[in-house]
Amino acid sequence: QVQLVESGGGSVQAGDSLRLSCSASGRTLSSYAMGWFRQAPGTERQFVAAIDRSGGSTDYIDSVKGRFTISRDNAKNTVYLQMNSLKPEDTAVYYCAATRLSFATTRGVYAYWGQGTQVTVSS
């Protein structure tokens, strides 16, 4: 079983950047495909980005393509989400998640979740 801890959230202005980190313990992260999800108040948790076990394949929700980049450093057991050109609609709690599948964008197949980190973007 893997334990995940997110960090790097905060309050920023529109147009600013943030880098979220997700550190894993308990199991080596290279055994898992990873994803980032977000949840704004009153909404369902939505997929944001995913990366396969090796880091060779990624996918994004359309609204963040060209602005967000997911990456991983398996040697450091860490996954990142670089968020540029942030918009107020990006405001949410961001969660990282792990799945034993080789790659996934569907929330339901992710078995392991962090506690979330708040990202607030003001205009």
Image (cartoon, grey):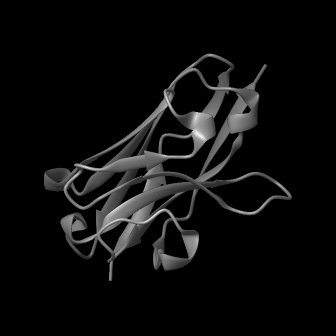
Residue at 69% over, 26% down: 87
Direction right: furthest residue: 42
Give 5 or 105, whichever is nearer the viewer: 105
Placement of 58 over or under 14, stated as above or below: below
In the image, residue 73 lies at what x, y percent? 21, 48
Quadrant occupied by the C terminus? top right
The quarter in which the N terminus is drawn is bottom left
**In this figure, what is the number of numbered marks?**
0
Q: Quick check: 98 left or right of 9?
A: left
Q: Residue furthest left?
A: 75
Percent x, y for residue 9? 56, 40
Q: Which residue is drawn at the image coordinates 75% and 63% (left, top)?
A: 44
Task: Give the x, y percent position of residue 32.
Answer: 29, 69
**Where's residue 90, x and y in %?**
68, 37
Residue at (71% x, 39% y) in the render: 91
Q: Which of 89 and 113 is in front in this view?
A: 89
Seen in the image, is 4 located left or right of residue 72?
right
In the picture, measured across the screen, residue 91 lies left or right of residue 78, that is right
In this picture, residue 95 sits left or right of residue 87: left
Residue at 43% x, 48% y: name it: 59
Q: In this view, does 116 lie above or below 99?
A: above
